[in-house]
Amino acid sequence: MSILRTIHDVPVLMCGSEGEAIGGEGDVMDLVGNAAWQGAAWVVVPVGRFDEGFFRLRTRVAGDIIQKFVNYRVGLAVVGDISRHTAASPALRDFVRECNRGRQTWFLDDVEELTERLKGRPAPRP
């Protein structure tokens, strides 16, 4: 279940922790479409919803999923603890650091961190 919420005047689609695992770009099409239909600028997805392949960069799952969000100009916030994944992969750690420097995809510990980041920031749309 997803709920549209406004955080600092930014519409955010909050995905619940229950639901189908997200393991590829096909799995996010309904989610991205729903976000676009509701006018959400960001989608928040709990870490537990992603298939383990998302956190192994060599699978290209993360890149494919993130690209769908980029194509539809919707930001993606992956929320939750991914420390076990980043501890095991320097490449993933670098990828997360680079994503968090940008305005399109963020890996955050919790929704409060998202709230802080959205303060005074424009939506990812051009």
Image: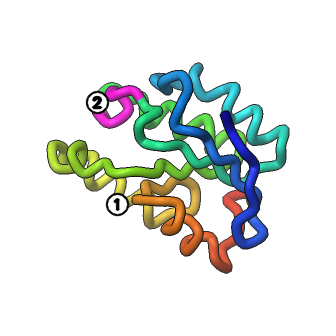
Question: How far across and how far down the image is residue 115, in percent?
Answer: 59, 69
Number of residue marks: 2
Q: In this view, does 24 lie to the left or right of 29?
A: left
Disc 1 secondary structure class = helix
Residue 27: x and y in percent read 57, 22
Q: What residue type is labelled 2?
A: Arg
Q: Nearer the viewer, residue 43 or 46?
A: 46
Crowd class of label 1 (few under 14; some 14 to 19; many from 20; radius 10 Å): few
Q: Quadrant of the image for the N terminus? A: top right
| Residue 28 quadrant | top right
Indicate whether 78 appears above or below 121.
above
| Residue under the point 45% across and 36% down | 63
Residue sitting farthest toward the left: 88
Residue that badge 1 annotates: 97
Q: What stretch is highlighted in magenta?
A: 51-58
The quarter of the displayed image where residue 37 is located: top right
What x and y, as percent, mark residue 35? 74, 41
In the shown orientation, is residue 43 left or right of residue 108?
A: right
Q: Which of 11 and 68 is in front in this view?
A: 11
Q: How did the renderer colour the structure?
A: rainbow
Q: Are marks 1 and 2 in contact (CB under 8 Å)?
A: no
Residue at point 46%, 51% (across, down): 79
Name the residue tied to disc 2: 58
**Distance Cα–Cα, label 1 vs label 2:** 17 Å
* Amino acid type for the residue under numbered disc 1: Arg
Question: What residue appears at the point 75 percent right and 62 percent down from the top-left corner?
Answer: 6
